[in-house]
Image (spheres, rainbow, N blue to C red):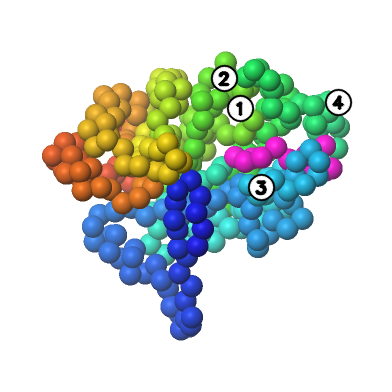
Amino acid sequence: KFKSYGWKLHEVVAQSIQDGFYPLEGCIAEAKRMGLAITGDILVGSYNTAFSEGFETVDASGKPYKHRASCIHRPEIQKNLALVAEEVAQVPGLDGVALDYVRTVNTCFCQACQMEYRARFQRDLLEDGKIPADGAPFSREFVQWQEEAVRQTVTGMVAAIRKSNPHLIILAHGWDPGEFSESDRYRSNQGRRIFNWIDEGLIDFGTCHFHPPDPRIEQGLLQAGAVIKRHTGVIANLSNWVMGAKGDSEPEDPEKVCATIYYFRRHAKIQGVSIYFDKTLSEAQIKALKEGPFREKASSPAKPLSYSLTPKQ
């Protein structure tokens, strides 16, 4: 049990499990009955006790960050993540795989990263990796360094998923303002370029989070939707909560949730709208959605659309 950003989560641990017990079986069957698609979520950049030991991101002093993460510049981590992706893709009943935390999370200053960076660019990673003052951009070399590591990791995971189950939909969660345009690109040190991956056909869909709402992300999402050549792929992922004055989450105004859904529906390049739940929808939110944008039954994208990425007719 832990508390973070106002979340209270409880992990249930079984005392005994019979051989062959598959906890997702009943859940997936019920989801299929309701017409829902299920994706397996992989936390790409997060620290994993199974394989991150010895390959953890460290700060400039050589100490692990408070928010622990794997150094995805390391081939060992990339290989292990590909194996995880292959295993998840084999879970019976899944419709897709979602890549979350698909970024560097931290800037790693381990000795291996410093040596490789200097050999490649003849520059000092300790200097280039510093957060610039007054919102100045990072160096092009540093941004390239981060982007290439993330892309190489994603490419390996996607290849493993496609090989294991070529019919799965692959989506990635994320986006921050620095991911949308060349002008903002060098203010982002996370290495994530989801809309490029969509455009190149590497992944099928990408979600842009709105929790809490950020006008820069909204502007960037619409800009990304405008420059993406494909007519599918961009999903606006809204939140049903906002951050309160004390740091705890509070339910978003129901009418604002509905208005935001209508807003993005009007943009042709936005393929869909999803809702990210911090907590269960409030009764007022459910009522507003039922009477508003959810009055008509939504039609989920047909699988041929998802697979071929052709415009919906």
- Please tell me in which quadrant of the rendered image residue 121 appears: top right
Q: Does label 3 or label 1 sit earlier along the sequence?
A: 3
307 shown above or below 228: below
Return the residue at label 2. 184
Q: Does the magenta stretch include residue 108?
A: yes
Looking at the rendered structure, the kind of residue marked 1 is Ser
Q: How far across and down, in percent of the image, does residue 191 sit? A: 62, 33
Q: Which of marks 3 and 2 is nearer the N terminus?
A: 3
Can see residue 78? no
89 is higher (above) or lower (below) than 220: below
Which label is found at residue 66?
A: 3
**Tag 1's secondary structure?**
loop
CB-based contact (under 8 Å), mark 4 and mark 3 = no
Main structural element of the magenta stretch: helix, strand or loop?
loop
- Which tag is nearer the camera, tag 2 or tag 4? 2
Q: Name the residue under label 1.
A: 188
Query: Which structural element holds mark 4?
Result: loop
Q: Which amino acid does label 4 sit on?
A: Gln
Tell me what residue is drawn at x 31 percent, y 51 percent. 280
